[in-house]
Image (cartoon, grey):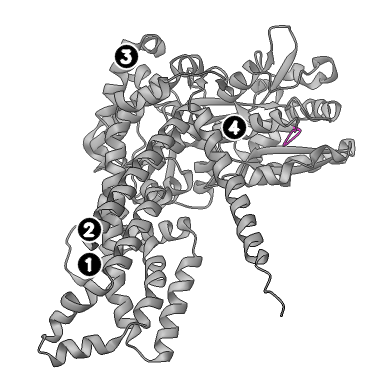
């Protein structure tokens, strides 16, 4: 009898690990190293070991900006999931043809670049061509004003960006769910309106939490939507980091800010993982 | 100020690395968008016709991002382009770390035509940059909403804009110098940190009027043309193009002057085509070439006006006789991170 060789999957796993090490860990180490360099406004930077770049984070408004980023990404993530989950439930109950239609629609939304989406929303919210002009025409708004830039506009942009991703992550599990549990609940007297809260939400609790966390991390890194649709007061840490690193060619400060954001993100993720685990146990 | 038109980021790098393969080909990079396209279509073919040297034109991203790429390439002993168009801030910082090749003015007789100061010399008396063009930033308005051209920069502070101003986010846009000239009797106030803080506080008064602090020029231009914004700071040359296209915009030189910025050609240190690059610079410095660039690109020539055949009308389209306001690059470099953070805090807090 021949033994099934098992080194194949291991080899693939090893290769994937190697790729991760080269394209993720090494740049990360380089970023951490650069964050200790001394920025040189007349040139570029000097190889050094200073805490100055980190000191700046705690002594100035970067602190406020990072809290702001955490807030807007968390709110965005919750909104995306709160909107996408009901839609996925609705789609999963449709006929095969319509399900396919929705999936293709969501997939094609993912093909659009962030910049194109940003510009589309910009036009939709402009007072000369968009929704405000429409409301004026219908007679609902006497003196229409552009809806962007604003916090709301930025949120819409963030939600739009994450919507198809969340829907497509949730779809397989939701479509395959055991519908007999819902039927049993109804048979046992749960009002149909309560099935969503009593049955569906608890069933998908873990996947909803994990997809919300994924979205939170994803939205933390978004750059175009805050700059195009947000006010300066809404700009996230990503915007400030790129201003520092690219705009002012101050790589050490940009790197230090990025490292701090990374640490904060990891802490938030670990904390929420621990919290959900405790509740499950 | 950044001059990459629209959101062009890192594509330039991928095109440039193979440049040095043929001696009779020069890779020239310029700000992506209108500038790069017009140079490639109108100017470079004339140089090729005269010298037989082919020019490969590539688009470069905004200034600091491009400098970061040039730095990384220099460390790998590569030149992404044989020639590159940069603003003086990049020029000075690059020179400080030895990014640019040294050039011999004797090989570039055309550079004698340039207005004094446009051939930049390093400490050892060698040239490292040659003036390419100058461009103005002016007070632009949408004529459907502001029929009368503004007479002074002080009008930016008047409440008449209905909260529809668009201003650049970066501190080197020239707004600091404009504010200093208009309200503090000149740019000297910027020499001390106290003075800078006063000027920034004055700019902060604009905040209720500004609905867009832009870093993407495309977004500003589109918003101004559609009337979404009524006024702001923008490039004179691009605005003139919009006017010729019949759009309801105007570009005004207020009585305090427009903001002038200089752009230079530099040769990255690792370029292998320095002789051909010098020929190129010789060609680009001639009054005929400068006049042609003024006509086709709307730039302000870096040769004295008398040496060109520009008519009064053509000259008025690209600049003004009013003494311009100059961005104080030495202050921006000296105050570096402190100034940038103060400015950003003023906007984003």
User: Label for residue B184?
Assistant: 3
Point out residue B325 in the picture as x, y percentages from the top left corner.
46, 20
Disc 1 crowd rating (10 Å Cα; few below 14, some 14-19, many 20+) is some
Q: What chain letter is assigned to the residue under label 4? A: B
Q: Secondary structure at mark 1?
A: helix
Q: What chain letter is assigned to the residue under label 2? A: A
Q: Is residue A15 above or below residue A203?
A: above
Q: Which residue is the site of mark 2?
A: A144
A190 lies left or right of B181: left
Residue at x 60%, y 18% (from the top left corner): B92
Distance from the alpha carbon under mark 3 to that under mark 2: 38 Å
Residue at x 31%, y 11% (from the top left corner): B194
Is A94 a magenta residue?
no
4 vs 1, front mark: 4
Q: Which residue is the site of mark 4?
A: B68
Distance from the alpha carbon under mark 1 to that under mark 3: 45 Å
Q: Assess whether mark 2 and mark 1 are in contact (beta carbons under 8 angstroms).
A: yes
């Amino acid at each position: 009898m021949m033994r099934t060789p098992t080194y194949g999957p291991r080899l693939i796993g090893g290769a994937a690990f190697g790729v991760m090490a080269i394209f993720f860990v090494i740049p990360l180490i380089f970023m951490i190293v650069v964050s200790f360099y001394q920025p040189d406004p007349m040139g570029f930077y000097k190889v050094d070991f200073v805490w100055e770049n980190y000191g700046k984070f705690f002594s100035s408004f970067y602190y406020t900006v990072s809290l702001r980023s955490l807030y807007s990404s968390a709110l965005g993530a919750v909104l995306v999931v709160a909107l996408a989950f009901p839609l996925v439930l609705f789609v999963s109950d449709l006929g095969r043809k319509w399900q396919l239609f929705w999936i293709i629609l969501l997939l094609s939304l993912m093909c659009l670049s962030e910049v194109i989406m940003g510009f589309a929303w910009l036009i939709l919210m402009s007072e000369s061509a968009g929704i405000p002009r429409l409301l004026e025409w219908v007679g609902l708004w006497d003196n229409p004003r552009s809806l962007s830039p604003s916090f709301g506009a930025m949120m819409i942009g963030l939600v739009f960006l994450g919507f198809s991703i969340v829907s497509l992550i949730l779809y397989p599990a939701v479509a395959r769910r055991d519908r007999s549990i819902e039927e049993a609940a109804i048979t046992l007297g749960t009002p149909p309106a309560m099935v969503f809260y009593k049955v569906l939400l608890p069933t998908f609790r873990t996947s909803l939490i994990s997809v919300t966390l994924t979205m939170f991390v994803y939205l933390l890194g978004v750059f175009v939507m805050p700059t195009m649709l947000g006010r300066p007061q809404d700009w996230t840490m990503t915007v400030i980091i790129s201003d520092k690193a690219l705009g002012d060619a101050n790589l050490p400060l940009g790197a230090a800010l990025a490292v701090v954001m990374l640490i904060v993100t990891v802490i938030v993720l670990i904390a929420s993982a621990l919290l959900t685990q405790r509740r499950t146990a | 100020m950044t001059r990459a038109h629209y959101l062009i980021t890192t594509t330039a790098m991928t095109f440039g690395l193979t440049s040095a393969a043929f001696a009779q080909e020069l890779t020239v990079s310029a700000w992506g968008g209108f500038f790069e396209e017009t140079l490639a279509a109108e100017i470079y073919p004339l140089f090729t016709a005269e010298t037989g040297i082919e020019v490969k034109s590539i688009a470069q991203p905004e200034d600091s991002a491009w400098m970061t790429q040039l730095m990384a390439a220099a460390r790998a002993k590569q030149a992404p382009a044989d020639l590159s168009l940069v603003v003086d801030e990049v020029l000075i910082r690059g020179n400080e770390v030895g990014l640019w090749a040294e050039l011999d003015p004797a090989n570039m007789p055309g550079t004698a035509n340039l207005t004094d100061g446009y051939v930049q010399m390093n400490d050892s008396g060698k040239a490292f940059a040659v003036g390419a063009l100058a461009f103005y930033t002016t007070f632009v308005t949408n004529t459907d909403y502001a029929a009368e051209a503004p007479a002074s920069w002080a009008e930016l502070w008047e409440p008449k804009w209905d909260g529809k101003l668009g201003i650049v986010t970066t501190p080197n846009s020239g707004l600091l110098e404009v504010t200093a000239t208009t309200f503090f009797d000149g740019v000297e106030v910027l020499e001390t940190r106290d003075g800078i803080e006063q000027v920034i506080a004055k700019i902060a008064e604009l905040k209720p009027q500004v609905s867009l602090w832009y870093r993407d020029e495309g977004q500003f231009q589109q918003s101004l043309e559609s009337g979404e914004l009524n006024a702001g700071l923008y490039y004179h040359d691009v605005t003139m193009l919009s006017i010729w296209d019949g759009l309801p915009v105007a570009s005004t030189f207020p009585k305090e002057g427009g903001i002038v910025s200089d752009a230079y050609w530099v040769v990255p240190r690792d370029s292998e085509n320095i002789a051909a690059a010098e020929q190129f610079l010789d060609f680009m410095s001639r009054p005929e070439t400068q006049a042609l660039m003024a006509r086709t690109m709307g730039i302000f020539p870096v040769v004295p006006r008398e040496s060109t055949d520009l008519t009064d009308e053509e000259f008025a389209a690209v600049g003004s006789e009013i003494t311009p306001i100059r961005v104080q690059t030495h202050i921006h470099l000296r105050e570096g991170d402190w100034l940038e953070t103060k400015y950003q805090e003023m906007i984003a807090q």
